[in-house]
Amino acid sequence: MPKLNYLILTLLFFYPISITAQNNQPTKQEINKLYNSLDDSTTDQKIKEVEKIIELSKKIDFKDGIGLGNTKLLYIYYHRSDYKKMLEVIKDTEALDLNNNRVITMLYFYKSYVNKAMGIQKEEFQNIKDGLKYAKKIEETDEKHYLTSSLYNRFSIFYDYKKPDSLIYYLKKELEELQQISDKDKKQRSKKHEKIALNNLNIGNFYLGVVKPQRLDLAESYYLKAYNYKTIQPDIFEKLDMPILCGTGRFYLEKHDCKKSIELANEVLRREKYKNNPTYRLFAYMLLADSNEELKHPSDQAKYTLLYAKLNDSLNNAAKKEVGKQFDRLVTEAEAKKNKEHTSSVRILLLIAGCFIILLALSIWIYWKRKNRTVHKKYEELIAKISNEKKELPSKSLKTEDHTESKTSVSITDETTKTLLARLEKFELAEKYLRKDMSLTWMANHFNTNTKYLSEIIKTYRDKSFTNYINGLRIEYITKKLYENPIYREYKINYLAEECGYMTPRVFVAAFKNEYDVTPSYFIEKLKQNEVNTPA
């Protein structure tokens, strides 16, 4: 039977081509059938197949067929995070000047992702609004509800934790649309229930981690609806088992049902062995470490904290190598054009202004170069520090052990000191310093201690005040992101500030300059100039 299915698909694919060879007129219906026969894979072979169907569409001037093929390519390039290719396909699709609400909706949908990746929030928001307008005009009911739900999901991602009321509003609007999709089409049914399961997780996460104070009572039903797919729709659960198990496990931890949390985390580890997704293994280690800490099982807590730290380091190193492979794609045509135009403008200005301006410009250049020498030296020291960080990790990790016998100016027992230092290390590994509401009081409550003890521990063992300690962690975090992930260099300063926990760009810039004696703009500019030489 599989061989027969393969033969049918093969004949279906080449049948229009044979028609083309005979009378040069494949039909629109045949082209649509070809698109419907494609799966959701994102391989190079799939790109070739889509491009062949697009060529068939061009031969009969079937613009909707070309547009639909372009949306298939956008889907592939989106899952590859190839935003440059996405921009090219978007431009080609816009040039078609289509009147197809489905294709236009999907075009705006993918445009919103590209603008999000580039940090252009205003355009991203407008894209989602425009897409929603066209989605509601789609005649086919299930398609209309499906694409409308996708755009409501994009709204929820856009608002995120910045506007909690808007976030939960659009998550529930998404759920309403999904529930209106019929189950008549098997493929559509699967997508529908996958999205409903994920939507339930997202609403649960909202009540667990966004709304203040937590509403565990409201979160519980949504987590259980997702988890119950294990019984009522095991095929859907098998696809989404990792996020469902991790999310539900975190819920039970917050509910202080640590045994259930450990049970779900261990199930993640069992499944991860054959699914091979280390990101979820990392999350499971974190759940196990936190659960055992609450159960006061120090040996198990230490075991899973160490496993978490080792795996986290391994994933970071792997990501750094992957970034190194992508450097050739970083210099865009837009950047080259901008540099060319800038150079041309400078030359014209010098010719018109004459010798006086040349001398003045030369004087300014000499002054700037002298002033910049010190700043550039700071930049080079920072790059050297980041590059050698891997070598410095062992000595850094020993710092806590070396000081465990030293005494603080405040009387703190050795047992309390060791406990707080262990929690401090876990706090740093979990990147909880990125919270916008971070304060000494919050952190002390989170550590189950008082502000006096915590402040003294940070001062003694991290050699910084609380404020400088948090700023240092945040700035180190965003510096690594900028160094390791080139896409961050395209983001605006206000986005970078928000990413590492600052409420305003001004405070972020001041903290960055105080930490490294260079501004984030200067650091980004120099990284771009030296992209080819940046080590992987």
Image (tube, grey):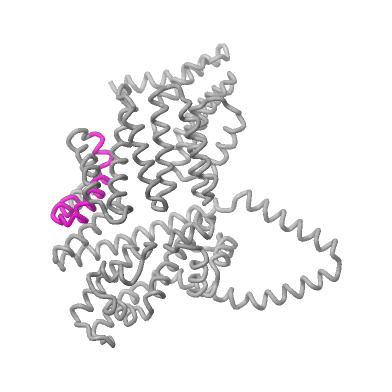
Residue 241 falls within the magenta-colored stretch: yes
Residue 70 in sight: yes
Residue 316, quarter of picture = bottom left
439 or 390: which is nearer to us? 439
Query: Left or right: 242 with respect to 300?
Result: right
Residue 385 in the image: x percent, y percent? 46, 73
- Tell me if 27 is positioned left or right of 390 in this view: right
Q: Tell me: residue 246, above or below residue 511.
A: above
Q: Nearer the viewer, residue 103 or 209?
A: 209
Q: Nearer the viewer, residue 180 or 237?
A: 180
x and y, in percent, of residue 418 in the image: 22, 77
Picture residue at 37% right of the left edge, 42% below the top: 169
Residue 536 visible in the current orientation: no
Please tell me which residue is depicted at 37% across the width and 63% down the height of the picture.
437
Extreme residue in the top direction: 23
Image quarter where the N terminus lies is: top left
Q: Residue at x 76, y 75 (%)?
A: 363
Compared to residue 7, the image places residue 434 above or below, namely below
In the rendered image, the vertical position of residue 163 relative to residue 305, given as above or below: above
Residue placed most toward the observer, 340 or 159: 159
From the top left corner, tell me how far across and down residue 24 is, in percent. 57, 15
Q: Residue at x 58, y 63 (%)?
A: 525
Please tell me in which quadrant of the rendered image residue 173 appears.
top left
| Dominant secondary-structure state across the stretch colored magenta | helix
Say how many tags the image has. Answer: 0
- Region rendered in magenta: 235-264
Residue 60 among magenta residues: no
Q: Position of residue 179 (x, y in %)?
A: 31, 31
